[in-house]
Image (cartoon, helix red, strand yellow):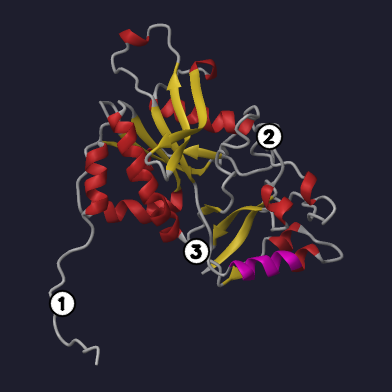
């Protein structure tokens, strides 16, 4: 249970780049490199940590909801980071040759469920193609959800570490990147929180003739897939008529060109080896078919209320 700060305000901490701590005066004005808006964390007075790294596995854990591919502000133009992530997704689910001008997206699209509650899709994505009707595998629009990470345990320990670093006379990056014990990614919470969203939005997508695509971080994939594969053998439909895709984002250590909006951040890419294209119904079955009979569950002893 130990992590290190991997990115502070969009700047990675492991390559010696100098990082300037956020001050009280600068908090509301600091731009986020991953969207055309300010940094929400800094504006709220929180530490602007975008991601942490688990010391044991060395995997990245995103701790900001805007880090992977923010949907907000809805009416602002997408920046180069967002366009790059969405283009990667389109190349993966539609065609490697698809151009950015062919990728169509809507953000935070409402999904009405009942009069009292509704949901929204992070993105709805489709493609524009001059010969769409003649394609061998007809395209369908997709509901696209982004879940790169979540919260951590012992967040106070991480906050205290960063607070001490910010107050140093010379706050060097190597001190910021020192290990923080007792803090660990809460992977189980991230997946549990998304299951209802996944089931509801996925069902709506199926009934409306679309597909469901989930973009997840590597630690969620490593937690989730072994458990699901214990209950069902997924058919690989990536070259066929799939209706559910899990796209796993990992660090890209070989990237050459970086977007000007986030040149010092950690580059991300889709790992096809750790991604899944299958049938939505099979995936739902795997989720709901967890556990096994437990003979001792309802056996004595019991206690009486009096």
Percent x, y of residue 247: 41, 39
Q: Which residue lies at the image location 41% right of the left edge and 60% below the top edge?
A: 188
Q: Which residue lies at the image location 80% right of the left edge and 53% below the top edge?
A: 20
First in residue order: circle 3 vs circle 1:
3
Residue 150's label in the rendered image is none
Tell me if label 3 and label 1 are in contact, CB under 8 Å: no
157 in relation to 285, above or below: below
At label 3, counting other C-alpha atoms closer than 10 Å, the crowd grade (few under 14, some 14-19, many 20 or more) is few
At label 2, counting other C-alpha atoms closer than 10 Å, the crowd grade (few under 14, some 14-19, many 20 or more) is many
| Mark 1 and mark 2: Cα distance apart in space | 55 Å
Q: Which residue lies at the image location 19% right of the left edge and 48% below the top edge?
A: 232
Viewer-side label of 3, 1: 1
Figure label count: 3
53 in relation to 2, above or below: above
What is the residue that sits farthest to the front in this orientation? 115
At label 1, counting other C-alpha atoms closer than 10 Å, the crowd grade (few under 14, some 14-19, many 20 or more) is few
What residue is disc 2 on? 36
Residue 56's label in the rendered image is 3
First in residue order: circle 3 vs circle 2:
2
Question: What stretch of residues is rendered in magenta?
Answer: 155-163
Percent x, y of residue 5: 63, 58
Query: Regarding mark 3 in the picture, which secondary structure is present there?
Result: loop
What is the residue that sits farthest to the bottom in this orientation? 306
> Which of the 4 quarters of the picture holds residue 75?
top right
268 in relation to 42, above or below: above
What residue is disc 1 on? 298
């Amino acid at each position: 249970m130990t992590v290190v700060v991997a990115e502070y305000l969009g700047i990675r901490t492991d390559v010696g780049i100098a990082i300037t701590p956020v001050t009280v005066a600068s908090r509301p004005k600091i731009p986020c490199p991953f969207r055309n808006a300010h940094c929400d964390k800094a504006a709220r007075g929180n530490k602007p940590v975008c991601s942490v790294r688990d010391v044991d596995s060395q995997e990245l854990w995103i701790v900001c909801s805007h880090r992977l591919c923010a949907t907000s502000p809805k009416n602002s133009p997408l920046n180069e980071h967002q366009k790059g992530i969405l283009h990667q997704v389109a190349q993966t689910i539609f065609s490697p040759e698809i151009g950015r001008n062919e990728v169509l997206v809507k953000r935070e699209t409402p999904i009405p469920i009942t009069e009292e509650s509704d949901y929204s899709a992070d993105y709805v994505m489709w493609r524009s193609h001059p010969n769409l009707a003649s394609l061998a595998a007809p395209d369908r629009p997709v509901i696209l959800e982004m879940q790169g990470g979540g919260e951590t345990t012992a967040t106070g320990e991480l906050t205290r570490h960063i607070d001490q670093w910010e107050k140093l006379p010379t706050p060097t990056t190597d001190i910021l990147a020192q290990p923080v014990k007792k803090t660990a990614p809460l992977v189980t919470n991230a997946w549990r929180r998304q299951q209802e969203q996944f089931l509801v939005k996925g069902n709506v997508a199926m009934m409306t003739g679309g597909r469901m695509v989930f973009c997840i971080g590597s630690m969620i994939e490593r937690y989730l897939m072994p458990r699901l594969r214990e209950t069902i053998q997924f058919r690989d439909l990536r070259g066929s008529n799939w209706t559910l895709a899990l796209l796993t984002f990992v660090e890209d250590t070989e990237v050459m060109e970086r977007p000007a909006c986030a040149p010092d951040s950690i580059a991300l890419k889709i790992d096809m080896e750790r991604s899944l294209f299958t049938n939505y119904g099979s995936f739902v079955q795997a989720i709901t078919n967890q556990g096994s009979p437990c003979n001792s569950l309802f056996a004595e002893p019991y206690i009486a209320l009096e």
